[in-house]
Amino acid sequence: MYIVCSDLEGVFVPEIWVNVSSNTGIDELKLTTRDISDYNVLMKRRLELLQKYGLTLRDVQNVISLLKPLPGALEFIDWLRTKTQLIVVSDTFSEFADPLIRQLGRPALFCHHLTTDSEGNITDYNLRQDDGKKHVVEALQSLNYKVIAIGDSYNDISMLRKADNGILYNPPQNVADEHKDIQVVKTYASLKRIISQLLNGEE
């Protein structure tokens, strides 16, 4: 029996930090896991920038409140739910993700959480566990599920390699070039076709 694990940003919704960068004019905040493979290096720099420019959790949430799912994402998720189960596994934070997950019909979400002070400044980030996406796949496989994993960035690679079928969805060229053994698709129609073939082959 198959289950699907998918990243959130870049697959179903826009990149949060890219939009924070656009709205604040802080150019360095546009860097994501598509650009920097070490997530801890990336997050520490983001927190430094938030502190430097006096941006609070509320400021980031205000940007997120303006975001909508990527074109075709809702239709794909609705289709997928008629075929199998979806778990969103993301390196975002529950404090960021809720309005986006709500727009997607509240699929199960495994992510991280933030620490804030009394003034709403983000003081730290708390990983649910290191390499959490890969561990979700391993846990599901231990329950005798086969896993189809979908991601777009460096931080998805270990999950995609561990899954029974890993798919890079519309990744930047640098990620695709460095991981040529992982299948790349660029449209939801292509995702539907691959998933349908896998599910039909199981019957």
Image: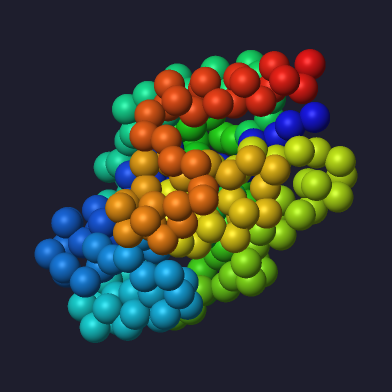
Q: Nearer the viewer, residue 92 or 117?
A: 92
115 in relation to 61, above or below: below
Residue 62 in sight: no
Q: Nearer the viewer, residue 6 or 161?
A: 161
Q: Quadrant of the C terminus?
A: top right
Give the number of marks.
0
Could you say where residue 25 lies in the image, as x and y percent from the top left? 12, 64
Q: Quadrant of residue 22?
A: bottom left
Residue 138 in sight: yes
Q: Nearer the viewer, residue 113 or 134?
A: 134
Q: Residue at x 44, y 41 (%)?
A: 184
State the colouring used for the structure image: rainbow
Could you say where residue 21 lies in the image, as x and y percent from the top left? 21, 61
Q: Quadrant of residue 117?
A: bottom left
Q: Quadrant of residue 65?
A: top left
Instruction: Farthest residue to the front: give it.
Output: 181
Q: Nearer the viewer, residue 195 or 71?
A: 195
Could you say where residue 121 lies in the image, as x and y percent from the top left? 38, 75
Instruction: Farthest residue to the left: give it.
Output: 25
78 in relation to 155, above or below: above
Q: Residue at x 86, y 50 (%)?
A: 142
Could you say where residue 166 lies in the image, as x and y percent from the top left? 58, 44
Q: Quadrant of the N terminus?
A: top right
Q: Is residue 23 left or right of residue 137?
A: left
154 in relation to 37, above or below: above
